[in-house]
Image (cartoon, grey):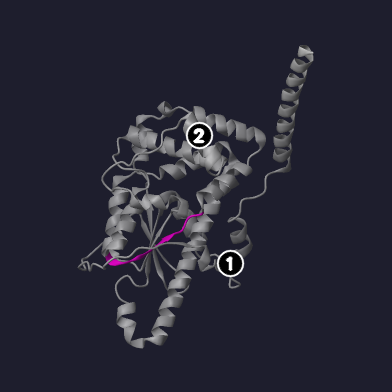
Amino acid sequence: MASASGEADQSDLEWCEHQVDAVEVPTTEYTLPKTATTLVSPEGITVILLGTAHISRKSVEEAQEIVKHIQPRLVFVELCKSRQGLLSLPLDDVAPHQELSIAAVNNAIHNGNGVSDVIQLVLSHFTFQMAEKIGLEITPGTEFAAAFQEAVKYGGKVALGDRDVAITLNRAWRALSLWEKLKLAWGLLCDSYDEFTAEDLERMKNSDIITEMMQELAEEFPRLMDPLIYERDRFLTYQLRTCCTSMAQYLRQTLQRCPEARQHLLGRGSTTIVAVVGMGHVDGIKKQWNKEVDVEDWERIKLIPPKPLGEIMLKYTTIAATVGIIGFIVYRRVARWR
């Protein structure tokens, strides 16, 4: 829920808990990579926004190095709770992934979140196909694991800041008309990976391939742009602002109780957040950063909208027609036996 002050409430954040023995890393000179942007919250908390390419070895190394050298109090990653498993990915190997098959699609429909899980399965398969074509030997999203595993070494806290993928995909699906849904489903299942040129594949090595895929989908289906890109830009910004507010409150309250802890609390990385996000979200977060939080928008984009009346009517009409056809067939056969 959002608070009356206009900030997203801390309860909306997912925290990744871990217990470790802190390891002190010697202080050395470190220059931020070109893919990093520094933002400052109204409370004075520094946010280092690291834009990554999800299938780039360089992004994995940058995420690892920036957390290692800065040792921020908090590492913020573009993941939700349902994708938390990515944090345990091996950094030097490709993790196995589920192949796209009729059985896999059927399992997603019956055992998960329905259409959102099917779309996620197809997009995941597509991403792995691209990674294989490019020849990269890492799993998409490994940079989040690198940042997390580095934070664990010194006892840093990790926040999962993205909107749940099921909400995102359901909001995207319900934004489409019936015709657009049929067209999108056909395109996802039948698209060819061989249409990409060598130049396209080379460019993808240094781009946010997942966001690019979503943007390409949104070009053909403009209604997808808001739920897939713009809403998530705002969601990530709201979550980051929440982290800044929470961190500032914690530091202020702790210093009031224990003034002698000032040197420890305000030491290396203690007022810093490193946020690891796809580079496709960096400009959107920067654009939203200094705007007031829209509480109504914040509440709206966290929910799955109800199904359109036309879709509900079509569903029950289809069921009724199917039952009617089966009943007619049974009636005709019974009549023949008589």
Going from N to C along the chain, the mark reached first, 2 or 1, is 1
Viewer can see residue 175: no
Alpha carbon separation for disc pair 2 and 1: 36 Å
Viewer-nearest of discs 2 and 1: 2
223 or 91: which is nearer to us?
91
Residue drawn 26% across and 67% down? 21
Rendering coords of residue 226 (x, y %): 57, 48
Residue at 59% across / 55% down in the picture? 301
Q: Which residue is mark 1?
A: 2
Q: Quadrant of residue 196?
A: top left
When the figure is inspected, residue 213 is found, relative to residue 192, above or below; the finding is: below
Along the horizontal axis of the image, is 224 left or right of 274?
A: right
Give the amino acid at mark 1: Ala
**Which segment is the magenta one?**
154-163
Q: Secondary structure at mark 2?
A: helix
Can you identify the residue that label 2 sits on? Answer: 105
- The kind of residue tagged 2 is Val
In the image, residue 299 lies at what x, y percent?
61, 60
271 is higher (above) or lower (below) than 63? below
Q: Is residue 313 above or below residue 36?
A: above
For disc 2, the neighbor class at 10 Å (few under 14, some 14 to 19, many from 20) is: some
| Disc 1 residue crowd, few under 14, some 14–19, many 20+, Cα 10 Å | some
Residue for point 72% across, 24% down? 326
The part of the image, by quadrant, that contains residue 74 is bottom left
Is 157 a magenta residue? yes
Quarter occupied by residue 220: top right
Quarter in which the C terminus is drawn: top right
